[in-house]
Image: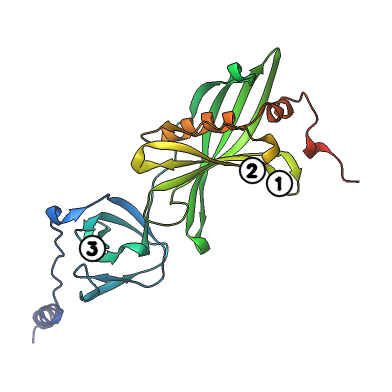
Amino acid sequence: MNLKFLFTITLGLIILSQPVRAEIIFAPDQLVGPSGPHLVIRSHVNVREKPANTGKKLGKLSKNDIVTVQGRAKGTQWLAVRREGENIGYVYAPSLTPMIDASLKDALSGQIDLSEKDKPECSYQLTYEGRAIEEDISFVSSDYLVHFKCEMGFDIFRFTAMMFMSEVPVDLGNQPIYQITLNLPEIATGYEEFLSATALYRQAEDTVAMDAVSLKAYKEKDLKKSAEAKNVKQALKAALALQLDSFNVKAWEIIAGKIPNPGDKKPQ
């Protein structure tokens, strides 16, 4: 017998015996809400054929998988999901959290003038340093270094700060609210007690709002509440302006070197 002919027949029978999986089709008019990349934040997440617990199980997703959401099925809490270019089914919304890409190809630069408040006028350059991933808690962030050159009165001074922007919501929920924190570890009052300021990028509202300053003694009494931001670059710039303004005059005198830095005191 012709072995090639036998192999062809056998292979054909094997192929015919495999179940054919129908393509999942999402009806655009039945999907609402935001779309885009999402992170899986739970283990062993079911993917279903229909947007309901009664839908046939088509597979599972693992914690920290990344998928693309096409929208939410109307009247449900189920998200239509794609992966590697294919529609894979519906996933229960609380199992996913929206992601943004906060990486930068080029440095950001700008000016922040606080001189009317007896604070400095600063120029800055912000550079992207890479992405940090903490898989245990499903946290992803973009890290930056910010180099400042400031003038306050007749004094000119420079300093460098660390900054990060979370690429998942701060509470790992479904609302696209991302944390932007500026850290000045050299301005410290104790072990791991250093000056920092946190703002929140509310993507759905196109705003950045101040959230907190770590050291009460260096916090401005009246914080500017928010600024407009329609993308990541604008959010970073808006956050920097709000964060520098959140430091009071005493904080700036320490940063400028005009009064002693508590962090420089030697332990007794």
The earlier-in-sequence mark between 1 and 3 is 3
Question: Which labelled disc corresponds to residue 193?
Answer: 1
Q: Secondary structure at mark 2?
A: loop
Q: Is residue 184 above or below residue 59?
A: above
Q: Secondary structure at mark 1?
A: strand
Which residue appears at 13% of the width and 74% of the height? Answer: 20
The earlier-in-sequence mark between 2 and 1 is 1
1 vs 3, front mark: 3
Q: Position of residue 152 (x, y in %)?
A: 67, 17
Please say if the residues under marks 2 and 1 sit with CB atoms less than 8 Å apart: yes
Q: How much space separates mark 2 and mark 3, taking CA atoms?
A: 40 Å
Q: Secondary structure at mark 3?
A: loop
Please say if the residues under marks 1 and 3 sit with CB atoms less than 8 Å apart: no
Question: Which labelled disc corresponds to residue 214?
Answer: 2
Q: Callout 3, which amino acid?
A: Thr
The answer to whether residue 185 is visible is no
Crowding around mark 2 (Cα neighbors within 10 Å: few <14, some 14 to 19, many 20+) is some
Q: How is the image coloured?
A: rainbow
Q: How many marks?
A: 3
| Quarter in which the N terminus is drawn | bottom left
The answer to whether residue 247 is visible is yes
Residue where numbered disc 3 is placed: 76
Q: Position of residue 210 (x, y in %)?
A: 51, 38
Q: Is residue 112 left or right of residue 11?
A: right
Which residue appears at 8% of the width and 80% of the height? Answer: 5
